[in-house]
Image: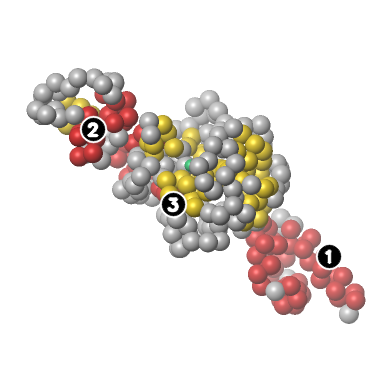
Amino acid sequence: MRFLFILLVFCLPISFMAQNTPTIISNPKLANLLEEYKSLIGENDENHLFSESLTGNEIDVTSEFWDTSRIRLDYNNDVTYPINIQFKESNYVSPISRNKVVTSRYGWRKGRAHRGIDIDLVTGDSLYAMFDGVVRFASYSSGHGNTVVIRHFNGLETVYAHLSAYGVKENDSLVAGAYLGKGGATGNARGSHLHLEMYYKGVPVNPEYLLSFDENNEIRSQDIWITKTWTRPELHNSRRQSELELFSTEEDAIASMNKPPRVYIVKKGDTLSRISSRNQVSIAALCKSNHIRKNSTLRIGQKLIID
Ligand SMILES: [Zn+2]
């Protein structure tokens, strides 16, 4: 009995961490031992122990642009649009265990870019890794406060900011659902919340384009194509969720990028703020697309690019 216990506890995890998992599982003796082992440790722990080997994450995400000194990396514009991200699962693990209430969204906020979403929490709430990955950054940064950045195996990075305590350190390998630390209000945060950002090769992506932040924890598409629109905060409003137009094929994404821009012709009495609210586009985006300033005088008949 003692021998069996030693075999189960020490040999099985090592066997299952080996790369060639399918061969091991097809061995009936080991399959039986796995069943016994599972009944000993309980089903729940099994996911955490084995998900790394079972999902076949053999890619070394630390081989390129692995910089543990900063949150956002500069890939020297090594990104082409539309960006493709693939997910293996159809769900993600929620970063918090309570219901997610998004209090501020990706977009323009008080004249500045808000490159993430804010999820309400109570200081001390546990935070969890949303997908398998490796911790690239775990330290303090002004603004973000105590922050953990995880690089996932599909190239996506998730950033968890304003933590009150760390549960991981740089270069730690994590499975989805692993404990990261505790939520808080460190850095530039008014009230406790999780400020959550997502990057692909240093490009910020609106998290709500990729994932649903409700009780379903859904990945919008296992194969998703990101146009520039979903990376530019000035095209979104932090106070409301942007209308979702999902691209799950490269063709659809390219077609949308090649669409001619919407044009608005200035009428009598128009102001930038009126045009902004009637066309669901921020003043910042109008200024940027039309090379004008917030206080520029508009002429009747002037053509403005809306997006
Ligand atoms: Zn925020």
User: Is residue 151 in view?
Assistant: no
Picture disc at residue 10: 1
Q: Which residue is mark 2?
A: 273
Of discs 2 and 1, which sits in the foreground? 2
Element type where label 2 sits in the image? helix
Question: Which image quadrant for residue 20?
Answer: bottom right
Q: Secondary structure at mark 1?
A: helix
Amino acid on which disc 1 is placed: Phe
- Amino acid type at circle 2 is Ser
In the current view of this chain or complex, which residue is farthest to the left?
268
User: Quick check: 42 left or right of 286?
Assistant: right
Image position, residue 18 (x, y; %): 74, 57
Q: Could you tell whether 42 is left or right of 155 in the image?
A: right
Q: CA distance from mark 3 to mark 2?
A: 25 Å
Q: Is residue 255 above or below residue 5?
A: above
- How packed mark 3 is, by other alpha carbons closer than 10 Å (few <14, some 14-19, many 20 or more), is some
Q: Which residue is mark 3?
A: 102
- From the top left corner, tell me how far across and down residue 125 is, in percent: 60, 56
Percent x, y for residue 133? Answer: 63, 48
